[in-house]
Image (cartoon, coloured by chain):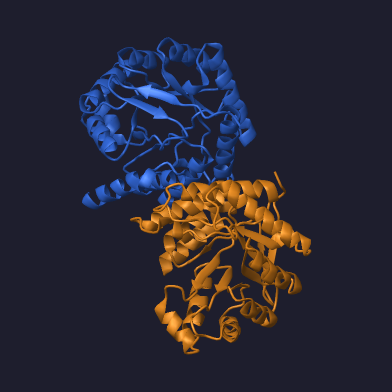
Chain colours: A blue, B orange
Amino acid sequence: MAENLTTVVSSETKEVLISRDRPCVIIGERINPTGRKKLATALQAGNFDIVRQDAVAQVEAGANILDVNVGVPGADEPALLVQAIHAVRQVTDVPLCIDTADPQALEAGLKVYDGKALINSVNGEEARLKSVLPLVKEYGAAVIGLCMDDEGIPTTAEGRLAVARKIIERAGKLGISPEDVVIDPLALTLGADHRAGRIALDAIEMIVAEFGVNITMGASNISFGMPDRQAINAAFIAMAIHAGLTCPIVNPLHEEVATAILAADLAMGRDEWGARWIKAYRQRLRD
Amino acid sequence: MAENLTTVVSSETKEVLISRDRPCVIIGERINPTGRKKLATALQAGNFDIVRQDAVAQVEAGANILDVNVGVPGADEPALLVQAIHAVRQVTDVPLCIDTADPQALEAGLKVYDGKALINSVNGEEARLKSVLPLVKEYGAAVIGLCMDDEGIPTTAEGRLAVARKIIERAGKLGISPEDVVIDPLALTLGADHRAGRIALDAIEMIVAEFGVNITMGASNISFGMPDRQAINAAFIAMAIHAGLTCPIVNPLHEEVATAILAADLAMGRDEWGARWIKAYRQRLRD
């Protein structure tokens, strides 16, 4: 078993430590125009009101880091990403996760970001490794590595582990240490393959055992097309936390999932006196 | 890693297989007068209406095995247990878990039980090992072994593993094979020790790795004294299933916990096409 590593990300004023010895770190996923037409339209018009609202609401609901994605068709993404980062910074001081597929937008974002950012994401594709990892190194950031490569997403846990290994090794060759690589094993849809959850859970355990790195993952794809999705997502995320997930990327406004994360921390012995659980319960009663 | 074992329990007409390759087996815990004054009073009066109602309701809610406990003060427990077994048998044919601390009641129950019963329980105490294990062997039953001994309940996962080892070894000396020993690691109250959940989860993983035996556990003690208990129980049981729990002892009428068990099976890849999940969802809609 590899030693558990600690990933540090920060804003100008706030440091967030991610490790299996601490409660989960929640990466708020809401600032993303995918499937959100209103936000997409606002971003295309250069309006950041929704971005600011989403930032505030997610932090109030428990997000420790905010993902910022402004990928909309026809926009100048580097400029838009810089503006979005400034907009979020006007209303909250939590560290950010800069989420873009465009290396120029990524560099533009990193240039204006004050602190140690988390980058979303690199993967095992040669082109991505070559474009993203040098920026991770140059800007002293941390990076999320998705378990997919030029062959696609491996259909086995062993295959995902192999991609994680490739990313961690390639990062290492550039002097990026494993604590600055956060792996996302990728949770696919149970409706398409009933073993999708198991493959992700097994991949987490294998990656943690071999490298001790921190693990991020979304929990909503898994239930796509199933009834009572929130209940599936809640159970799955609690199980993933038991497997080794440390910084889920979720919408903290989804109460069932946010509650499951707190309950999982409690069950993992990471919530002394149940103080965080009781505090969150009281806040839900007030809301 | 030990090979995963399969435990078989049966009634005259039904066989239930417990293993980590199959969906969880639910042991319905409801027929138990502890903390249920109405049931206790009815049992003392020799009235088994509630017992029959509880049996039917639990099986309809998904119980695969029914625990039968009639321990009330001042009663002739052997006679009462035999009557309760007959009462349950009038309304359902699922296998039973004969639950008593009284060796005479246990033997009386085993004598009238048709099939291979599960016995609840032995533990690591010398007196219990000596009184219960010979009955397990004589009647060809399976037995639940609680991780406590003459020193009490160990406060570490390693301590619980040691008691499990003792029970499995002592059973082996009488010719009872490990597949007929189901271990309960005991989940204590988080409110008294915030590591209680973690100790139980770690104990499950260790016991499964060393022996491959099946694991039972209740999930309600853990949240005693905390707000929003059902959410804690649901997350904890999903995590325990990921750790290796195969036959939780729960009240299947508690919807959040029953749903979490189904969701955990789905996430573990034990519910092909999500057929059980979808069926249970439709049933909830109808109810």
Task: Kindly identify the residue that appears in the image at 55 percent across and 60 percent down.
Answer: B248
* Residue A87 on image: x %, y %: 23, 24
Question: In this rendering, does residue A168 appear at all?
Answer: yes
Q: Quadrant of residue A195?
A: top right
**Quadrant location of the N terminus of chain B?**
top right
* Residue A59 on image: x %, y %: 28, 35
| B42 relative position to B24: left or right | left
Task: Kindly identify the residue that appears in the image at 36 percent across and 47 percent down.
Answer: A273
Vertical position of residue A27 compared to residue B91: above or below: above
Question: In this rendering, does residue A69 appear at all?
Answer: no
Vertical position of residue B202 compared to residue A249: above or below: below
Residues A103 and B58: in front is: B58
Vertical position of residue B110 compared to residue A10: above or below: below
Residues B153 and A216: in front is: B153
**Quadrant location of the C terminus of chain B?**
bottom left
* Residue B109 on image: x %, y %: 64, 80
Q: Residue furthest front?
A: B151
Residues A74 and B113: in front is: B113
Task: Kindly identify the residue that appears in the image at 43 percent across and 64 percent down.
Answer: B254
Vertical position of residue B85 compared to residue A189: above or below: below
Task: Kindly identify the residue that appears in the image at 72 percent across and 60 percent down.
Answer: B170
| B68 relative position to B140: left or right | left
* Residue A170 on image: x %, y %: 56, 16
Residues B132 and A162: in front is: B132
